[in-house]
């Protein structure tokens, strides 16, 4: 391998930091030997903190109504072909009960920005899940809300919040979103969540339209500074009902490369091998774990609505029962030398 690239990787491992220009070079000049070296170092860093444990999160997709119009997303409000649904509190509680029996100790409630889920309704759901499963963590992934709303949900018992920043480059952000959505507001939400006391997840799509090594370098620099507890990255996959329908999908190769880099920047981070990664490559999730990921998020939503929560085309697991997804992931995780564990899977500080 080129000596310069190897030096960058060794310095990244040592200092957990590179300049933006260096991150951009590490990405633009990448080659397979660099990817293997990064993966080897990332897996060592992960194993030092977490051993061979991979955590599972039960994903419950509670609503596909959304007031936003992100250009990449299949449930954007302008997509008239999207058949909308939302789950009742009863249905959500039933998904969680099934998940608990299958060994899930974290429930992730994800949905579009749906005005139906007022603070009152959402707090009631969160409080109920925490009451019925006191040994479980509840994670919310419900988009941008007021600070006061985040506070009330936290007080109701929510432990974690996922809000991908989508891109840390302002100009790039404006090309992925309609004018009424603001980069500054997104970043303000992430800071509010952190201040309130949530374990916070940010993240972005890999290979999103107009992304460059330079915008990715900004994402990495943001992660270096923000030190998220979780970081969700997965390839962009075009959805036929969006303005980006003809844009190329991101690759598993670059996603795995970035997973390794993020692990080295912030070794304790909880990093999922995402469903989108499994969608662009049948062995994508295994490759993600072998690149340093340590979380998988099988679907716990009722099978009847799974197909409707369609952020992108060809999403996996829309026909599988929750137990099938759990078993499928269990086998995949084992095939790469790791073990699914029954645990909340909170972030672990380094010793
Ligand atoms: N391809 C991949 N990921 C997508 N998301 C939304 N649309 C797509 C797509 N077409 C991601 C966004 C969002 C998360 C819930 O799903 O990053 O934050
Ligand atoms: Fe759902 Fe593999 S994770 S079937």
Image (spheres, rainbow, N blue to C red):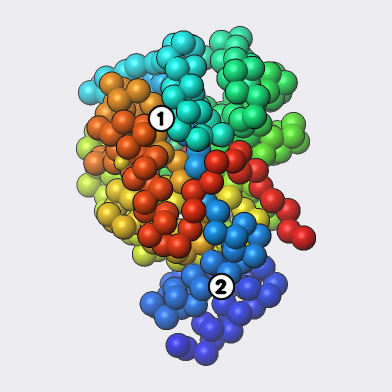
Return the mark for residue 41: 2
Q: Residue furthest front?
A: 101
Along the polypeptide, which appears first: circle 2 or circle 1? 2
Vertical order, 166 against 35 (above or below)? above
Answer few, some or many: residues within 10 Å of disc 1's Cα (few below 14, many 20 plus, some between 14 and 19).
many
Return the mark for residue 183: none
The quadrant the C terminus occupies is bottom right
Vertical order, 343 against 208 (above or below)? above
2 or 1: mark nearer the eye:
1
Which residue is painted at 49% across and 12% down in the image? Answer: 89
Q: Which residue is mark 1?
A: 300
Answer few, some or many: residues within 10 Å of disc 2's Cα (few below 14, many 20 plus, some between 14 and 19).
many
Vertical order, 179 against 125 (above or below)? below
Give coordinates of residue 119: x percent, y percent. Answer: 61, 14
Which residue is painted at 58% across and 50% down in the image? Answer: 270
Q: Is 1 left or right of 9, judged from the image as shown?
A: left
Residue 106 picture quarter: top right
Front one among 298 and 104: 104
Which residue is painted at 45% across and 88% down in the image? Answer: 1
Q: Which quadrant of the picture is home to ligand 1?
A: top left
Instruction: Answer yes or no: is residue 216 visible.
Output: no
Which residue is painted at 32% across and 37% down in the image? Answer: 324
């Amino acid at each position: 391998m080129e000596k310069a690239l190897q030096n960058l990787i060794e310095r990244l491992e040592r200092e957990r930091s590179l300049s933006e220009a260096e991150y951009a070079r590490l990405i633009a000049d990448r080659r397979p030997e660099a990817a293997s070296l990064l993966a080897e170092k990332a897996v060592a860093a992960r194993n030092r903190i977490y051993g061979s444990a991979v955590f599972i999160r039960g994903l419950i997709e509670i609503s596909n109504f959304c007031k936003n119009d992100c250009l990449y997303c299949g449930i954007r409000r302008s997509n008239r072909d999207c058949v909308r649904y939302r789950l009742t509190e009863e249905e959500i509680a039933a998904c969680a009960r099934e998940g608990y029996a299958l060994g899930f100790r974290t429930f992730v409630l994800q949905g579009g920005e749906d005005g139906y889920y007022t603070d009152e309704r959402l707090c009631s759901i969160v409080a109920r899940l925490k009451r019925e499963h006191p040994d479980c963590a509840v994670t919310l992934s419900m988009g941008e809300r007021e600070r006061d709303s985040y506070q009330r949900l936290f007080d109701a018992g929510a432990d974690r919040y996922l809000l991908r920043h989508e891109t840390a480059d302002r100009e790039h952000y404006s090309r992925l979103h309609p004018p009424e959505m603001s980069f500054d507001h997104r970043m303000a939400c992430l800071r509010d969540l952190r201040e309130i006391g949530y374990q916070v997840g940010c993240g972005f799509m890999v290979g999103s339209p107009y992304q460059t090594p330079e915008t990715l370098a900004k994402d990495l620099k943001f992660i270096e500074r923000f030190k998220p507890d979780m970081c969700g990255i997965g390839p962009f996959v075009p959805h036929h009902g969006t303005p980006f329908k003809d844009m190329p999908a991101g690759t598993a190769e670059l996603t795995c490369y970035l997973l390794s880099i993020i692990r080295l920047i912030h070794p304790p981070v909880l990093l999922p091998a995402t469903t989108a990664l499994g969608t662009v490559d049948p062995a994508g999730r295994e490759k993600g774990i072998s690149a340093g990921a340590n979380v998988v998020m099988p679907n716990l939503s009722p099978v009847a609505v799974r197909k409707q929560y369609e952020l992108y085309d060809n999403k996996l697991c829309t026909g599988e029962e929750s137990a099938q997804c759990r078993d499928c992931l269990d086998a995949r995780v084992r095939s790469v030398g790791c073990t699914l564990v029954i645990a909340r899977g909170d972030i672990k500080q380094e010793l």
